[in-house]
Amino acid sequence: MDVLVIGGAGYIGSHCVRQLVAAGHRPVVMDNLVFGHRSAVSPEIPFYEADLGDPAAVGEILRKESIELVMHFAAFAYVGESVTEPRKYYENNFVATLRLLEAMLDNGVKKFVFSSTCATYGEPERLPIVESLPQAPINPYGQTKLDVENCLKAFAHAYGLSFAAFRYFNAAGAAEDGSIGEDHSPETHLIPLVIDAATGRREPIKIFGTDYDTPDGTCLRDYVHVDDLSRAHIAAFEKLEAPGVGLFYNLGTGRPNSVREIIKAVEAVTGLKVPVVEDVRRAGDPPALYADSSKAQKELGWEIKFTEVKDIIATAWRWHEANPNGFGD
């Protein structure tokens, strides 16, 4: 299919573009480059610098490139910032997404794949997290994602939009060949932070809380390789052929790792010592979050290639070692 990837120059989007090509689809990338990197996208891929909240620009791309399906990765995703700057998050994550959906409907494009988040669950009542658990976000980031999910359900009912929404856990790793990887500013993801601490590119890593009710006292999180995420998105395409289809899937390995385990794994992969400072708990950090992804595996035939966190970290290290300045832009 001809697929428009909104946010296709960002971390997950750029990896998904590569997986689309590998699967025989034709990706077209649209990104405003606020957080994305132009060099993360091959020059051979059609690229448009535009904003998802500009329906005229989106409509022109949809028509010119004969787009059949849209994938949306262009959200703001800093939880703390969403608390202090909620207007920014509602404007981009919800209002601009509504403009995107309107442009799609106006141009007869009714297949949509949405990047959602496990943050829609808030503090889950039990683990592992299944899709049927109540959703009660505890920050504006999670709330805006849930608002879009609800909007999608209404659009499916009223307009025949078919969609799949994927609730990620902790995306991690880099392309296996080391060609692209993770380059955020600011960086908030644990694995690249630990790698940078190991190489001396940033201050010692802080462990926020060592007295949680977990095996080693530190928080447990579910790390899933970015290419595994991407393959799940593509596996949903054939499910969207009928009008009005609405699908929701968790994406995680279901094998949580603690902060201390990540640090030890980085040391094992890199051969470097990670400097560590222990600190008090951060407000709002649940002791553990991990997924039950059996629904995606059963319904989509999704197979998790990277089941061990050390293998995920090895791909991240390959990228960071070869690109200490990221994309350099």
Image (cartoon, helix red, strand yellow):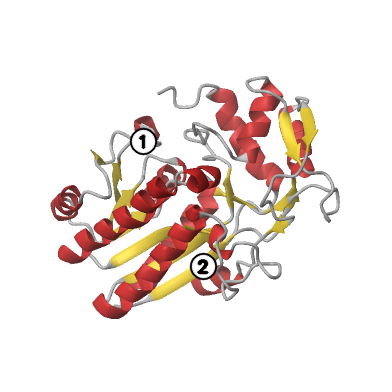
Q: Which residue is mark 1?
A: 34
Q: Tell me what residue is drawn at x 27 percent, y 79 percent.
A: 158
Q: Is residue 192 left or right of residue 282?
A: left
Q: Tell me what residue is drawn at x 57 percent, y 76 percent.
A: 132
From what the image shows, is residue 192 above or below residue 119? above
Q: Tell me if residue 282 can be seen.
A: yes
The residue nearer to you, when weighing 220 against 270, is 220
- Residue 43 picture location, percent across and down: 29, 33
Check disc 2 and give the amino acid type: Tyr
Dot label at residue 249: 2
- Residue 210 picture location, percent across and down: 82, 44
Separation (CA) of disc 1 from disc 2: 28 Å
Check disc 1 and give the amino acid type: Val
The answer to which quarter of the image holds residue 110 is bottom left
From what the image shows, is residue 202 above or below residue 194? above
Q: Tell me what residue is drawn at x 71 percent, y 67 percent.
A: 127
User: Which quarter of the rendered picture does the C terminus lie within?
Assistant: top left
Q: Secondary structure at mark 2?
A: strand
- Residue 53 picture location, percent across and down: 26, 50
